[in-house]
């Protein structure tokens, strides 16, 4: 009598990770913004887990991406400012996925290979060659270093030659087309699970009329975007050159916000296209779909523009996880999750081994609705100016479910905000005797966290002098 055939092992779920550039949590409809036109993102938020306390460890593009792929903080990745070339000896999520039998795809902005400030359209900065510098993403590749002109844009595959979308093609639309093509191919393949990272450039500036589609610009033509309650007419003295506003820029803030929301509306349309493609391919039930962003945008709040700061507008980001029948719909996950936790959390959901040197924690149980340990607070770092070796802007911060605590290196000035009572962070409580115990708790927590990472709160140029050569991060640079 023949033995019954064994059932084939259940295939691991697919992973589609989508992240915007400079989209803050508070700019989404599901988060309460009544001016946002984000019905598809809002629908996604209702279909799975909404991590309502997600933050970017260092709200700058390259630092975030390095932490996302390694599960490590900037003081361990070495990506302490933009326009550095990433080390290749980390065990990254791309490596783990490839070892785990996944067919990978990466589409969009990369921002981990340049080693020049400027000249970002030159292939030596925009093209990342096949091999170790792609950090384990060895499958389909349609990416570029960074650029933010969304018409007439380009990408690279496996050569320095630029592939142009066409002067009248809006880049996020074309990237979504490529992503949908990869989804269809994955649905037709049965031998391997599929993992794709889709990195949109929008809604990052420049916020000018020529950089947004007419169809979406009309949605906001008559909408006013006044300054928020925490707008300050003077520049934050701790801001670097990218974070300061000149008088002309202050006059343009209303227009900037209008174009930002226009870009976000188009981004939402493309998210809707992805959702439809996944459903049509029959992949929804076995696909973990994540939507997030690398950081937000200040738009004059606290006397700042851009990012690279611990304030809510810059640091707090959307993080939505959908996995039908596994992740409960409409789940509000309030864990203090940050960029370094995303890699181990995704690997936990996928059932893949987390590398031993990862510094984040697996919070997959928070998405699944089960119990488990959580961080007491998220730890945030700033190790320098946005993309230049300039001292005087460094800070460290902690954010728990209620408070944000921060300290500047320059003069050891401290800030403490009650984000529940004061969502615009207008009242610094660090000198308030009623909050002395809370302040002491955060001081002790910060000291312990920094010690655990060997983070000695160095000035920006220290990393230049000890960790890099020609803006390339040296192997073994840590500490």
Image (spheres, helix red, strand yellow):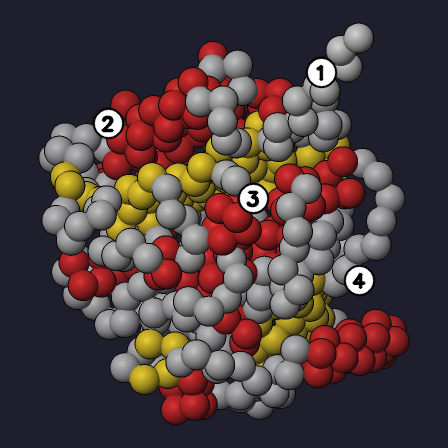
Q: Is residue 207 visible?
A: no
Residue at the spot x=76%, y=43% of the render? 366
The mark that comes first in sequence, 3 or 2, is 3
The mark that comes first in sequence, 3 or 1, is 1
The mark that comes first in sequence, 2 or 4, is 2
Q: Which element carries disc 2, helix, strand or loop?
A: helix
The correct choice, above or below, for 83 with respect to 281 in the image is below
Q: Position of residue 66 (x, y in %)?
A: 47, 62
Find disc 2 in the rendering and name its residue: 214
Find disc 1 in the rendering and name its residue: 5
In front: 43, or 124?
Answer: 124
| Left or right: 230, with 197 as reference point | right
| Left or right: 427, with 83 as reference point | right
Q: Which element carries disc 1, helix, strand or loop?
A: loop
Q: Nearer the viewer, mark 2 or mark 4?
A: 4
The mark that comes first in sequence, 4 or 3, is 3
Q: Position of residue 36 (x, y in %)?
A: 48, 33
Find disc 3 in the rendering and name its residue: 100
- Disc 3 versus disc 2: distance between alpha carbons? 44 Å
């Amino acid at each position: 009598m023949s033995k019954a055939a064994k059932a084939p092992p259940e295939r691991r779920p697919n992973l589609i990770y989508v992240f915007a550039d400079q989209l803050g949590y508070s700019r989404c409809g599901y988060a309460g913004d009544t001016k946002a036109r984000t019905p598809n993102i809002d629908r996604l938020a209702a279909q799975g887990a909404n991590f309502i306390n997600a933050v970017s460890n260092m709200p700058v593009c390259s630092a975030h991406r390095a932490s996302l792929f390694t599960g490590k903080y900037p003081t361990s990745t070495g990506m302490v400012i933009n326009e550095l070339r990433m080390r290749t000896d980390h065990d990254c999520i791309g490596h783990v996925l490839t070892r785990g039998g996944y067919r990978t795809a990466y589409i969009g902005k990369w921002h981990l290979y340049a080693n020049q400030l400027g000249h970002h359209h030159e292939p030596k900065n925009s093209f990342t060659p096949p091999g170790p510098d792609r950090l384990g993403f060895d499958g389909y590749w349609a990416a570029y270093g960074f650029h933010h002109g969304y018409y007439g844009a380009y990408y690279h595959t496996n050569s320095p030659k630029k592939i142009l979308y066409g002067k009248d093609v809006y880049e996020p639309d074309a990237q979504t087309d490529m992503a949908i093509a990869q989804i269809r191919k994955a649905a037709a393949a049965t031998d391997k699970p599929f993992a794709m990272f889709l990195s949109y450039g929008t809604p990052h500036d420049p916020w000018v009329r020529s950089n947004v589609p007419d169809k979406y610009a009309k949605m906001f033509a008559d909408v006013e975007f006044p300054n928020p309650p925490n707008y300050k007419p003077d520049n934050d003295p701790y801001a670097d050159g990218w974070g300061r506003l000149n008088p002309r820029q202050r006059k343009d803030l209303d227009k900037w916000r209008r174009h930002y929301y226009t870009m976000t509306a188009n981004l939402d349309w493309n998210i809707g296209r992805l959702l439809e493609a996944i459903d049509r391919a029959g992949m929804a039930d076995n696909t973990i779909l994540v939507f997030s962003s690398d950081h937000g945008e200040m738009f004059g709040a606290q006397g700042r523009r851009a990012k690279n700061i611990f304030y809510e507008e810059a640091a707090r980001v959307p993080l939505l996880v959908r996995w039908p029948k596994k992740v409960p719909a409409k789940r509000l996950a309030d864990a203090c999750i940050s960029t370094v936790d995303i890699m181990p959390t995704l690997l936990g959901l996928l059932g893949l081994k987390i590398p031993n040197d990862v510094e984040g924690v697996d919070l997959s149980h928070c998405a699944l609705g089960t119990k488990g340990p959580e961080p007491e607070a998220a730890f945030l770092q700033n190790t320098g100016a946005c993309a230049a070796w300039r001292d005087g802007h460094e800070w460290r911060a902690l954010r728990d479910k209620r408070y944000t605590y921060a300290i500047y290196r320059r003069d050891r000035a401290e800030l403490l905000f009650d984000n529940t009572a004061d969502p615009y962070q207008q009242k610094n409580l660090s000198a308030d005797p009623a909050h002395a115990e809370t302040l002491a708790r955060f001081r002790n927590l910060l000291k312990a966290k920094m010690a655990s990472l060997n983070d000695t709160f160095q000035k920006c140029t220290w990393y230049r002098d000890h960790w890099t050569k020609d803006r390339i991060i040296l192997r073994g640079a840590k500490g």
